[in-house]
Amino acid sequence: MKYDIPFPFMGRGRATVVTPAARPSSFTPSTPMTRTILTYGGFDGFHTGHADWLRQLARMGSDLVVGCQSEQFCQRAGRPAHLAFAARRAVLERCRYVSRVIPLETWDQVRSDIVNYNVSVLALPAHLPLPVSGLDEIVQVLRLPVTARETVQRQRAQAS
């Protein structure tokens, strides 16, 4: 491209600046590559351990879908939630790492969540008792260890 730039400070004449044309790259995808990560949890009493976990998962993909356990699910699991589902969902929606929050009603919905949200990776904490048999056929399943801080906080919560 050529640009005609006036040089008034020189009193006369004009300068022409030639910029090289942009070289086409060898690979230009028509759609951006996306990788959706799905995780589940209660997130009752959101703390820095939860934020660290979500940050770690967000770095693995372009979108992070979080399944937050509903109040009925927590009751059936024998761990009633201290905060209402709406409050826990609101906190998760305000977390900058989270793209979408969905309710977790039963473990049977996991397969449909994977399909409905086009999930690439199902990332679960090692302590979460989700049966993953058959899921590894449709999604990459990762069982990730939790940090020591999260483990200590979970033990304190169980003791009280």
Image (cartoon, rainbow, N blue to C red):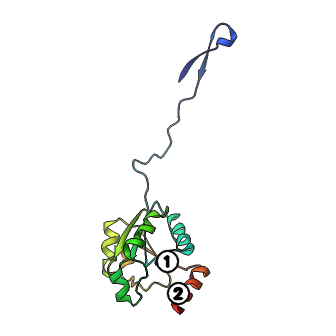
Q: Which residue is mark 1?
A: 45
Instruction: Say what amino acid the circle numbered 1 marks.
Output: Gly
Instruction: Say what amino acid the circle numbered 2 marks.
Output: Ala
How far from the left and from the top, in percent, is residue 135? 37, 78
In this view, 138 is above or below 16: below
Q: In the visual, does 15 lie left or right of 134?
A: right
Q: In the visual, does 160 lie left or right of 37?
A: right
In this view, 129 is above or below 23: below
How far from the left and from the top, in percent, is residue 55? 54, 66
Q: Name which residue lies at 53% across and 36% down.
A: 23
Contact, mark 2 vs mark 1 (Cβ under 8 Å): yes
* Front residue (pair 151, 141): 151
Labels 2 and 1: the sequence-earlier one? 1
Q: Quadrant of residue 74?
A: bottom left
Q: Which residue is mark 2?
A: 157
Dot 2 alpha-carbon crowd within 10 angstroms: few under 14, some 14 to 19, many 20 or more: few
